Image (cartoon, grey):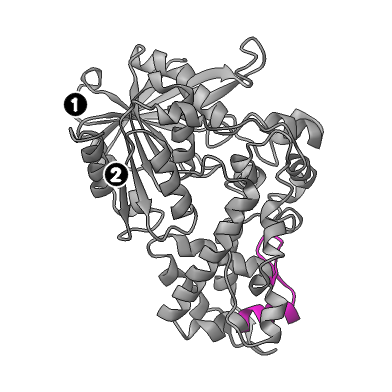
Amino acid sequence: MTAAHTYRQPGTVLTDHHFTVPLDHGRPDGERIELYAREVVATGKNPAELPWLLYLEGGPGFGARRFVGRQAWLERALTEYRVLLLDQRGTGRSTPANRQTLPLRGTPAEQAEYLAHFRADAIVRDAEAIRPALTGGAPWTVLGQSFGGFCATHYLGAAPEGLSAVLITGGLPSLTATPEEVYEAAYPRMEHKSRAHYDRYPMDVERARRIAAHLAAHPVELPGGHPLTPEAFQSLGILLGSGDGSHHLHYLLEEAFVPTPSGPALSDAFLEEIRALLSYAGHPLYALLHESIYAQDPGVPTAWAADRVRARHHRFDAAKTLAGDEPLLFTAENVHPWHFATDPALAPLRETAEALASRTGWPALYDPARLAANEVPVAAAVYHDDLYVDTEHSLRTARAIRGLRTWVTDEYEHDGVRAGGPRVLDRLLALVRDDARP
């Protein structure tokens, strides 16, 4: 750990931490990479008197959220914790992996081999490598949001001695589902969310169809050179997994067209907002590694599971939809090969993505036997209508982890820990501290 810089924001004292860890924890004497984490302590509190809470962000591919002051759940956490916001390897300031840096690794095959070390198992070993330097060896509480919850679930089976408690929000993964099974469960949820949006905003049925038909007939390029196809437009369904996402999508659709001398055209403002929503420039690992976070069978590649499953769900075919009179269905977290042909941030990594999709040898991520014998207090918020993580998969996992207590709610969407902030965290803390916990 290198020397830390300390500075202030409203109501908080922040400290930057830098660490070096092995790229491959199985080869501790090999290449090392740098990790970054930001410590947050409430103004006026003595950090030495506070236990640690490690926050693992959702993703994969997103650095820890850059809070200002005591936003969202931090308000509650800082009343009793010293919080560590870790940029998981490859994200933020932790040896970022993107189209600019990955060519330093060599060929696409060598890049894929490098990225094979960026899943939940490596992230947890990173956490265990840095914990002694921060806590003096004491266990810490882990808060995992979405993919961060996947990491926390792995943590429970791989290194429970490092944990005093685990809090999971919208991130209980299936312990056994294949990537294909994950997406077979996902497409019906996408359809349900699309139809729920149209029930709320029936005028958007025609608006979405009109936009898709326009894109099919008139090739459109987003600012920065990103072709906007009907399929790319459908992926705006990513919005439908957040608390206010349906409303955001509605406002976006209602202002799509403007009159021009050549007839109606998609407005610059509309295209610019879509570019920001659809670009992977800020989180390329999300696209590169998304299917591998579900891979657990060493003999089976992920092989573009979302794309293969989509081909069996014909109601998501934009061309067939436009030829009939059905509403256009939106998609969400599925990554397709065409993303690496259309997105300028991903196009240079197309061969790397293909190498990852064809890769075998992925080890299992979860240890059902150790989880069944778990002794770490665990609480999980399971969102009843979660777009991104299948509720039935989560509840099955909850039953498989000894002592895990769930809060199943339809009050929040997948981003509940952000939208609900202090209340969500308070509820989970109450569950792990309940003396009635089995």
Which residue is the site of mark 1?
Answer: 45
Which residue is rendered at x = 60% and y = 32% of the image? 364
Between 369 and 2, the one lying in front of the other is 369
- Give the Cα distance between marks 1 and 2: 18 Å
Q: Position of residue 323 (x, y in %)?
A: 71, 85
- Outermost residue, top side: 29
Asked if the stretch drawn in magenta spans residue 96, the answer is no
Residue drawn at the location 17% of the way across and 28% of the way down: 44
Q: Secondary structure at mark 1?
A: loop
Residue under the image location 62 percent in, 69 percent down: 233
The magenta stretch spans which residues? 210-230
Dividing the picture into quarters, in which one does residue 289 lie?
top right
SS for callout 2: loop
In front of the other: 284 or 53 = 53
Task: Tally the numbered discs.
Answer: 2
The x, y position of residue 132, in whole percent, is 40, 14
78 to 324, vertically: above or below: above
Callout 1 crowding tier (Cα within 10 Å): few <14, some 14–19, many ≥20: some
Q: Position of residue 372 (x, y in %)?
A: 42, 31
Label 2 neighbourhood size at 10 Å, few (<14), some (14-19), many (20+)? some
Q: Is residue 389 left or right of residue 422?
A: right
Left or right of residue 200, residue 305 in this image = right
Which residue is the site of mark 2?
73
Please give left or right for residue 322 compared with residue 413 in the image: right
Q: Which numbered tag is attached to residue 259?
A: none
**Amino acid bearing label 2:** Trp
Q: Quadrant of the C terminus?
A: top left
The image shows residue 197, relative to residue 153, as above or below, that is below
**Amino acid type, residue under disc 1 in the picture:** Lys
